[in-house]
Amino acid sequence: MKKLGLIGYPLGHSFSKKYYHAKFDAEHITDIDYDLYALQDIQQFPMLYEDDHAFYGFNVTIPHKRSIMPFLDALSPEATEIQAVNCIQIRRKDGRAYLKGFNTDAYGFEQSLLPLLKQQHTQALVFGNGGAAQAVYYVLNKLGISFQIVSRSKENGDLTYADLTRETIHSHTLLINCSPVGTFPDIDQAPRIPYEGIGQDHLLYDLIYNPDETTFLRRGKERGAVTKNGYEMLVLQAEKNWDIWNEE
């Protein structure tokens, strides 16, 4: 039986395990398993696959998207630029495992964002600077969309939340939440921004998918903005992972 898995710490509810098991059932894929591997210490990672040749791929989540990189033999172009990995492909040759890292978060975000972009979406504000945000920066640069990073401290971004004015929000018609603010169970929370600057030209994208509509998205929709949560991004990156693991 082939093996796939997710490494990170801690690992609670996993979108990936639920998604892939449902995929296996729906598509009648047999002799393969996907499980969770909670690794507090990344140095434990090689113990999973070195002597178990059934492994041919992993997903990587926090806090290991960067600390995993010294264990890899190669990186895809986007993983090299982003300097974060969420997908690992394993191939074996001459008794040795060769590991290549990819960042499919970038693919998922780009493909889910593109159909929504309009000519006015030339300037963005990105709320947060964590691992997922790095993939967002990469995609915005690739698409030629200028952006500023908003963080709680000036050391971690271009602007702080206290710097934001109604005019700043009005002139940046693409607003992307990469922070965990508003995630279940804290569904009443939202990034502290001047929502009165949002109008019908705005597109609000929230990487959060639980709840389906965050307070950030709801408040944008109330002001006429187009909104999008992070669920499709997750599905697209999951399917991209599957393609990578199974390519010849």
Image (tube, helix red, strand yellow):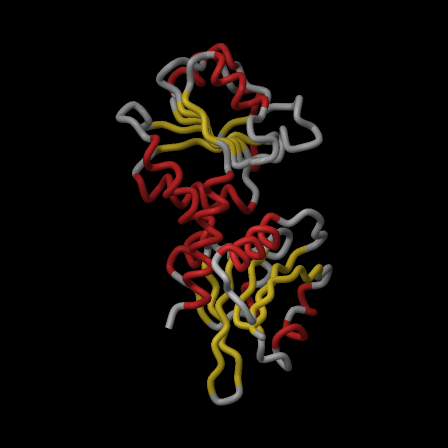
- Which percent across, then down, holds residue 110? 38, 42
Which of the 4 image quadrants contains residue 21? Answer: bottom right
Q: Quadrant of the N terminus?
A: bottom right
Residue drawn at x 45%, y 25% as measured from the top left: 227
Residue drawn at x 67%, y 75% as measured from the top left: 47
- Relative horizontal placement of residue 197, taking residue 66 as reference (left or right): left
Please tell me which residue lies in front, 237 or 195. 237
Position above or below: 41 against 163: below
- Which percent across, then down, holds residue 242? 46, 60
Position above or below: 28 against 206: below
Position above or below: 145 against 235: above
Which of the 4 image quadrants contains residue 48? Answer: bottom right
Q: Residue furthest bottom?
A: 94
Please tell me which residue lies in front, 159 or 224. 224
Q: Quadrant of the C terminus?
A: bottom left
Which of the 4 image quadrants contains residue 151? Answer: top right
- Relative horizontal placement of residue 36, taking residue 101 as reference (left or right): right
- Relative horizontal placement of residue 77, taking residue 100 as reference (left or right): left
Residue drawn at x 47%, y 68% as measured from the top left: 100
